[in-house]
Amino acid sequence: MINIEIDGKKVEVENGRSVIEAAHQAGIYIPHFCYHKKLSIAANCRMCLVQVEKAPKPLPACATPVAEGMKVFTASEQAVKAQKGVMEFLLINHPLDCPICDQGGECELQDLAVGYGGSASRYQEEKRVVLHKDIGPLVSAEEMSRCINCTRCVRFGIEIGGEMELGQAFRGEHAEIMSFVSGTVNSELSGNMIDLCPVGALTSKPFRYKARTWELSRRKSISPHDSLGSNLAVQVMDNRVMRVLPLENEAVNECWLSDKDRFSYEGLNSAQRLTRPMLKQGGRWQEVEWQVALEYVANGLRQVGKEAGAENIGALATGNSTLEEMYLLQKLVRGLGSDNVDFRLRQADFSADGKQLGAPWLGMSVAELNQADRFLLVGSFLRKDQPLLAARIRHAVKRGAQASVLHSADDDLLMKVANKLIVAPSEMVSMLAQILQTLAAEKKAAVDASVQPLLQGVATSATAQAIARSLMSGERSVILLGNFAQQHPQAAQLQLLAQHIAALCNGRFGFLGEAANSVGGYLAQAVPSAKGMNAAAMLASPRKAYLLLNVEAELDTQNGAQAVAAMQAADMVVALSAYKHQASEYADVMLPISPFTETSGTFVNTEGRVQSFKGAVKPLGEARPAWKVLRVLGNLLNVAGFDYDSSEAVRDEVLKGMEVSSKLNNQLQGLTVQPAAAMHGLQRVSEVPIYATDAVVRRSAPLQATHDALPPHAAMHGEELKKLGVTPGAQVKVKTAQGSAQLAIAADDKLPMGVVRVAAGHASTAWLGAMFGTISVERA
Amino acid sequence: MLSDQIQTQINRELGKYPADQKQSAVMAALRFVQDEKGWIANEDMADIAVYLGMPQMAVFEVATFYHMYNLKPMGRHTLTVCTNISCMLCGSGETVEHLSKRLGIGLGEVTADGKFGLREGECMGACVDAPMFTINNKKLCGRLTSEKIDQILAELDKQ
Ligand code: SF4
Ligand code: FES
Ligand code: FES
């Protein structure tokens, strides 16, 4: 520890800290632009000049390390003179037209100019002009003359985003922030550059000229998309969400947001919003009163229960539904006598059900990811599935951690990867078994009998050995199962292997949860008990009646084609949805419910953090929070215990007295495994693209205009294409057991042999059915 | 694609740096390209980026930062006139004017036959010989007068 004095205040700071950090610790503000606590030090704006005793000239506080006995003056005559001088220089080329700047009112330069700027400019000459750039649909670079070249945006790309998409080209007066050859910025974290930009150079494209910051009220919320549960500040004007910004929470999203969390709000008021209850009568959709719709639903359910038996009722929810919604949904169907309820719609393998000691979770806290020193990422499209968790792992890797990958695709993680095994989906289990095998051999440990069948006849490859050694050499090894591993037809086997690998390397293993409430769904008991049917079973053997909560059957399920067929075969389908969608083809009733901004609720993120939020705006039209809709349905159906007066009451019923951490457990016990039969022919590899994951993002126009939202194509290894005699770019017919799709085909030599990669979650590929399995390609 | 010759040159350069610091060779790599083609296209920068395993934008930053890299074709003989303070005081204005008149082009331009290009440059650290220009960044010609310039141009014209 080092003792210094700032403005007469004694401060004790860690060795190696800078003067600006010491000052912030002491609650003293030093003006600055280029300094940011999460980025490297550039010291190029010079706004932070302070006087330091015995130093002949003012020093930049952000780049001056503290030294014992140092005396700093942040507001002395010398310091202020220096700061004012810098401000005058900054303003020489900066346009002085704040009233027409989109950043006005929330501009760091504007704020500081009030304190340090002159009342008039002494500079009479022409200002420099920097041309605007088009860097994509999210970040506006329309006003690059406003840039003060602090390079925060550039450093963010390199250091946090992992890719240098923006840079500072040219020099001196001609220096410009730009992308290479006018490329777009495609990072899934690009929106953070808007927050970082201290001036109005980079602003939000969708929000541009929509409102002034002082016209907006800020409401706290939680992101309903990925399983991190980023904390949001939802900004509202006239009962409309105008913008979403991060709410700093060091333990969750730090000060960042993924673009998905930031721009999804643009889908909230889409023209497709369902604003009135609708009933299909005589084949035609009619808007009806809530009362009529709800009574219709109650009667229908009662009838199905009476005639076909309650087990013919099935309830499906997406993992983006709130804890309260899922809890009431399961309580309702269970009250009706059915146990068929599930939210794990994209899961294929349910053999772990009943064998797992608790709800599957990350296996550690989110913050602990930064501390891990060895990673094995199994089946994860990490950057796109959990962008900010990827940033944390990237951070750990930068500091020396080793990351290895086992996957069926080799997308760039924008971090150093120590070893990778890229194999067809059917090989994943045996590859993981090889790693376990090696570990057991190296440690001379016996492998538990339960996994033995998977190790039979497995020969270990050099890469598997390297991965095992990497894991063993660490002190805090972590094995993470991604979305792909969870959706995999042998998900439970992968889990079991991960469990034993973690045990042998004294590490931990866990799941990178797929959706905002992947843990919450378990706590809400929105999963079948032993006698009920899981999501896959409910769709494979059609029920007579379905309750769909937020579900778009063809997009949100493991097998969209099968799901739609099941819906079509049912006597009654009730779609609780914020949007009109394909349900109009198969549903009988559509009940308009509120998206996350219009309801209160709770998400339990992947580390088991319970985060409740309130509605930010009133529901649109006659939409109502789903928990209220379900409560009324409970009342109409005379199910006991449905008299809640708030969502908090529902939450308390679920969580009161519950030690959440005691409910989380990834361990499998008593699972018997059999190696899957060998597969022949080509196999499908599919991901749910980042902007196709749930109903809200699917309707956010700016997100849909990004590179990540391009319509799906098929991709294969170039050699495979040659075998088929197909040229890259050609249209092909992709076929599975369930259906076919006509797509353009691309060559991707990073894919393993024997696979065809076709994304799911999109209308054009929904009819291909299962996300995994055999697939064929022929010339169209 | 970088030519074999350039690749060999870069490889030799890479030997000077640690294996994980390949980007240290970026300035040399850009120079090799310019020596071969006379200028550096965006595609060349992209190729260099791949070759050295660095972001394209980082190569672009370097290439645009230093004025001695030509970002467009600058003629067979690129004359770069120093216009910094010492040269300016010694008459670099007239040098530029004379060259413009003789070649019929302004700064940053190339003659129609692609023979000569004219550029403005920064202090060449040889102010004692002011005013001056360089030919293709390689040969320094100082103490310029109209006569001397004409003589140099005539010689270059023959090449
Ligand atoms: S665009 Fe903004 S963040 Fe980037 S360098 Fe300019 S002022 Fe800084
Ligand atoms: S904040 Fe210190 S130089 Fe910019
Ligand atoms: S100013 Fe021209 S060489 Fe120095």
Image (tube, grey):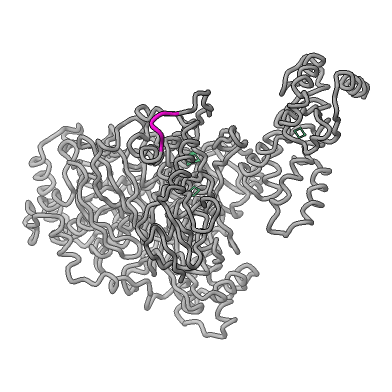
- Determine the image quadrant of residue A218: top left
Residue A11 in picture, x, y percent from top left: 39, 65
Q: State whether residue A392 is above or below residue A237.
A: below
- Give A576 or A75, whichever is nearer the viewer: A75
Residue A695 in picture, x, y percent from top left: 32, 44
Q: State whether residue A98 is above or below residue A33.
A: above
Left or right side of A531 for A564: right
Residue in the image at 43% along x and 58% along y: A21
- Residue A24 visible in the picture: yes
Count of numbered circles on the image: 0
Q: Main secondary structure of the magenta part?
A: loop
- Determine the image quadrant of residue A482: bottom left
- Give A582 or A419, whichever is nearer the viewer: A419
Q: State whether residue A156 is above or below residue A665.
A: above
- Magenta residues (range): A117-121
Q: Is residue A631 magenta?
A: no
Left or right side of A262 for B40: right
Q: Is residue A118 magenta?
A: yes
- Residue A452 visible in the picture: no
Q: Quadrant of the C terminus of chain B?
A: top right
Residue in the image at 28% along x and 39% along y: A268
- Give A449 or A417, whichever is nearer the viewer: A417
Residue A82 in picture, x, y percent from top left: 48, 44
- Give A193 or A241, whichever is nearer the viewer: A193
Q: Quadrant of the N terminus of chain B?
A: top right
Residue A12 in picture, x, y percent from top left: 41, 68
Left or right side of A358 for B48: right
